[in-house]
Amino acid sequence: MSRLINVILLPFGLLLSFFASAQSTRDPLFISFDGTRIHYDILGEGKPVVLLHGFISNSESWKRAPVRQALVDAGFRVITLDLRGNGLSDKPHTAEAYERNAELKDVMSLMKFLGVGTYDVVGYSRGAILTAKLLTMDKQIHKAIMGGMGLDFSDPNWYRRKNFHEALTKPGSHPELQSAVDYAKKSGADTVALARMQEFQPVTTPEELAKITVPVLVVNGDIDTDNGDPRRLVDAIPGSKLVMVPGDHGGAMRTPEFAKAVVDFLTK
């Protein structure tokens, strides 16, 4: 009988070992303000800079771009994280997990967890939208860079946000976005979580942008019109500057020109 029990339990033991191994691949993790576990990574030493990734993406996008290593080489401590709902972080499905700027509270909680005081932040695409709101919430930010973004996100009824939410929750509702939805599914992204991100995406109004006093750089691809005219964003943020680099929305952040613009601005 004992031999039979051992045979039965062996696969279960192997299964537990497998899950324990899979869990370890998510490290390092920190527990955010509401118990959500957030994956993060750190490379380099020096002044901290946080990189915020875009939509249907995760922190691996920064690791494939030259800007991360360029910042390390310039003496920065580069912090990346998988925003909740993405990558190796938890992917809650409830509305409560995404409303009231939960993603930004994760960033601020991570900085506290790491003992970081002032820091710089670089956001690309949806990460730039988060960066704008973060500038209104966290007085510890020293400089900020917003890549691949115009001013359109400042409209709470922005059609692009609403259309993406509908495309993810109502199959076939927006054929023009179907390729993005298909890509999300193929890449293993959690489409329920992605829909929540669009539903509760932060809105930073022009009035709020006008009150920003932190130095801001806007970097945009020279053939990128996905999120509006970047010059309108520069006009909305006092003292901000614009640098154009080669590429469309998907490619601009992976160029050496983007890396140079980021490093030059943060080292001045």
Image (cartoon, rainbow, N blue to C red):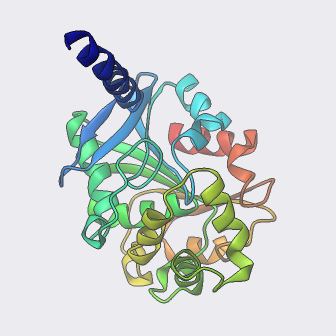
Instruction: Locate residue 243, reporting x and y percent.
Output: 68, 57
Q: In the displayed image of the protein, which residue is found farthest to the bottom?
A: 157
Q: Is residue 5 above or below residue 57?
A: above
In this view, the residue in front, 41 or 143, is 41
Q: Is residue 73 above or below residue 242?
A: above
Total numbered badges shown on the rendered structure: 0
Q: Is residue 58 above or below residue 239?
A: above
Residue sitting at x 55%, y 26%: 74
Q: Does residue 210 show up?
A: no
Q: Quadrant of residue 113?
A: top left
Instruction: Locate residue 223, reporting x and y percent.
Output: 81, 65
Residue sitting at x 73%, y 52%: 252
Query: Going by the image, does 235 lie left or right of 226?
Result: left
Q: Is residue 266 above or below residue 152?
A: above
Instruction: Locate residue 26, reporting x and y percent.
Output: 39, 33
Query: Going by the image, does 164 lie left or right of 261?
Result: left
In this view, the residue in front, 59 or 194, is 194
Residue sitting at x 44%, y 86%: 156
In this view, the residue in front, 60 or 177, is 177
Query: Going by the image, does 95 lie left or right of 48?
Result: left
Q: Does residue 130 show up?
A: yes
In this view, the residue in front, 90 or 150, is 90
Q: Quadrant of residue 219?
A: bottom right
Instruction: Locate residue 10, reporting x and y percent.
Output: 33, 18
Q: In the displayed image of the protein, which residue is found farthest to the top?
A: 3
Q: Quadrant of the N terminus?
A: top left
